[in-house]
Amino acid sequence: MYSQGLIGADSSSEETPEFLAEFQKRIDREEKIEPNDPMPSGYRKTLVRQIGQHAHSEIVGMLPEGNWITRAPTLRRKIALLAKVQDEGGHGLYLYSAAETLGVSRKQMTEELLSGKAKYSSIFNYPTPTWADMGAIGWLVDGAAIMNQIPLCRCSYGPYARAMVRVCKEESFHQRQGYEIMISLAHGSPEQKEMAQDALNRWWWPSIMMFGPHDSDSTNSDQSMAWKIKRFSNDELRQKFIDATIPQAEYLGLTVPDPDLKWNPEKNDGKGGYDFGAIDWDEFWTVVKGGGKMNVDRITARQKAWDDGEWVRDAALAHAKKQTAKKASATLAAE
Amino acid sequence: MSDQNEIPLWEVFIRPRNGLSHRHCGSLHAVDATMALNAARDVYTRRGEGQSIWIVPSADITASDPQEKDANFEPSESKIYRHPTFYEVPEEVGHM
């Protein structure tokens, strides 16, 4: 989720070496950093960028699933999907609030999303043409997100870590409801099984890419790890996700679209793990840079929501001001 | 919130159940207290997290300066005579 937000991030700091060393000592003692604490400018910039990108991902992430709410096959599926999308709106809010404690305004973050200056997870730039995509997204995309987010509950920045605790608590339902959809389809009619397999084929590699570039190509990772914003590297998390997910795919009786996937008993210090094929990074960079199928649609939808909501925001503010003025004059009259 | 057209920020406090105190759980933007309460209910109590909500305009909170943490809070560490273990009571007196 967040790993892509760090692409090209500027983590340089202007403070003295003594200040930076003192700060690093606090981090090494596992002290949490709170909003008004002194912190290196690079630490602040990195967090604003990462948390903002994470928040945008939650908000844009509502769109591919919102696409299916009115067409969910049963009432049970519909209420689950509604609740999931509502959660994502909430997650976006927790994260925006955490970013705001660092001195960036909500308005600024919204403008950066709409102008394309701020990124969101590229996974949401893939289309959701079938109902099975709701299953695959819950199972794989939320599964990958959980893998990323659990270590973030121990992030050195207090407000981010606390927001992540809430998010993780809620996220587990998302993955389970997605997997349940996959079970129904995979164990259903041949057509349904085919639909499930097709969704897995389309979502597998983009989910694997959610963990971001390989460690060898991820230049900002080291500083983030030292500051304990990040606890595991992109490749470590990716491997964990693959190892956890393959047995789940086997239970469904579906085939992961990777001919090079193979159990390797030597991996993970002899505990075993899966070897997997080469990731198509050209596709990843194309989508990150705006060339995905849905990049334009997603931002257009967000821009429309923002524009269409303007009169509501204006009216609510005007009403609140009027009420405050009324109250003030009533108090004055009573005196 | 210097911008007049910026929707104000509120801090949200939730009491998980009676018998416990309200605890800070996050913040949100809303134009007035009623809308802030409604939004807090929608966002922070979707899974039985609370029985009661307080909301406070963030701008009304006065916070101590973290830079003065030592000056503010160190003295409470050095005054060991404020703790019961500072005083010696003979064992035969029993638990006190």
Image (spheres, coloured by chain):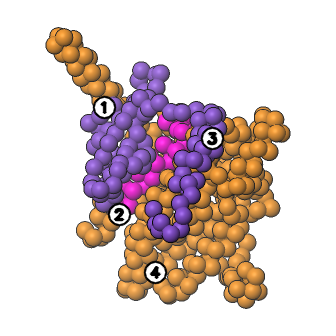
Chain colours: A orange, B purple
Q: Which residue is mark 3?
A: B74
Above/below status of A187 relative to A208: below
Closest to the observer, A140 or B61: B61
User: Is residue A45 something one can see in this rendering?
Assistant: no
Residue A203's image quarter? bottom right
Q: Which residue is mark 1?
A: B32
How far across and down, in percent of the image, does residue A79 sit? 29, 64
Q: Amino acid at mark 4?
A: Glu
Closest to the observer, B33 or A31: A31
Marks 1 and 3 sit apart, C-alpha to C-alpha, by 39 Å
Question: Circle 3 — which element?
Answer: helix
Residue density around tag 1, few if under 14, some if 14–19, many if 20 or more, within 10 Å: many
Callouts 1 and 4 close, C-beta under 8 Å: no
Labels 1, 4: front one: 1
Question: Circle 4 — which element?
Answer: helix
- Identify the mark at residue A81; answer none if there is no mark: 2
Asked if labels 1 and 4 share a chain, the reply is: no
Q: Which residue is mark 4?
A: A194
Q: Amino acid at mark 2?
A: Leu
Report in which chain the residue with disc 1 lies: B
Marks 1 and 4 sit apart, C-alpha to C-alpha, by 51 Å
Marks 3 and 2 sit apart, C-alpha to C-alpha, by 51 Å
Above/below status of A229 relative to A148: above
User: Is residue B25 something one can see in this rendering?
Assistant: yes
Report in which chain the residue with disc 2 lies: A
Dominant secondary structure, magenta: helix
Callouts 1 and 2 close, C-beta under 8 Å: no
Marks 4 and 2 sit apart, C-alpha to C-alpha, by 22 Å
